[in-house]
Image (spheres, grey):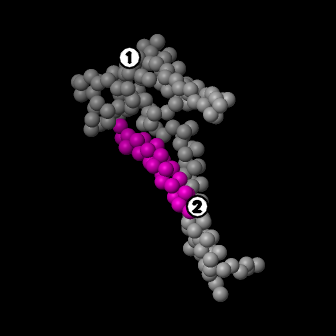
Amino acid sequence: MTTEVSREQLRKAKLGVCFVALIALIFVIVFSINVYKGLSGPITSINWIPHQATLISVAIDETVTKSTSENRSQYTLYAPRIMYKYTTDGNEHIGRKVTWNEIYDDGFMLRLAHELKRKLAAAEPIVVYVNPHNGAESILIKNVIWEHMSMLLVGFGISWAALLWFVYILAFKLKYQK
């Protein structure tokens, strides 16, 4: 069934779809930047060399988030704060970097913080990954933390699908026919 519409109605519909497509484009840009940030570090460190390191200090940093303005729900999220030392090419370096992005949560990061505290108390060495071109650059977790990237990738996919759908509507469906 085809509905007859005037040129003015079609123009208004196109403006509305353009506005919604512009909002979808903003979401695509934001999600693309965040996905790039989440994947670029792990990709650049693929060839980094594992080295044994000694923990100097471990602390658990916490932050409280509120889900509503009336403070009805509060969540405490955690992140490990560490300092470790390692030696490359006869030079001793001190590192503090845990992951590529500063992540607070009550799952993986909290478990990691407790594991690092246990290793510090037992004086167990840890493995850090060192940039072969710059021995002063190191990181503890070089991989993608999928617990955090999965929702970001879902949002990335949905925002792209929505944008492409709106472009399809603009290009093929909103045409004036006599």
**145 up-or-down from 64: above or below:** below
Residue 98 appearing in the image: yes
Give the residue drawn at x 48%, y 40%: 144
The label nearer to you, 2 versus 1, is: 2
**In magenta segment, residue 45:** yes
Work out whether 167 lies above or below 30: below
Disc assigned to residue 20: 2
> Which label sits on residue 94?
none
Residue type at mark 1 is Ile
In the rendering, at what x and y percent does residue 52 appear? 37, 24
Residue 31 vertical placement versus 110 (above, below): below
Q: Residue furthest bottom?
A: 178
Magenta stretch: give its range. Answer: 19-48
Q: Horizontal placement of 113 versus 126: left or right?
A: right
Quadrant, the N terminus: bottom right
Residue at far right of view: 1
Q: Is residue 130 left or right of residue 177?
A: left
| Amino acid bearing label 2 | Val
Mark 2 to mark 1 CA distance (whole Å): 52 Å
First of labels 2, 1 by sequence position: 2
Image point 47% across, 46% down: which residue?
34
Q: Secondary structure at mark 1?
A: strand
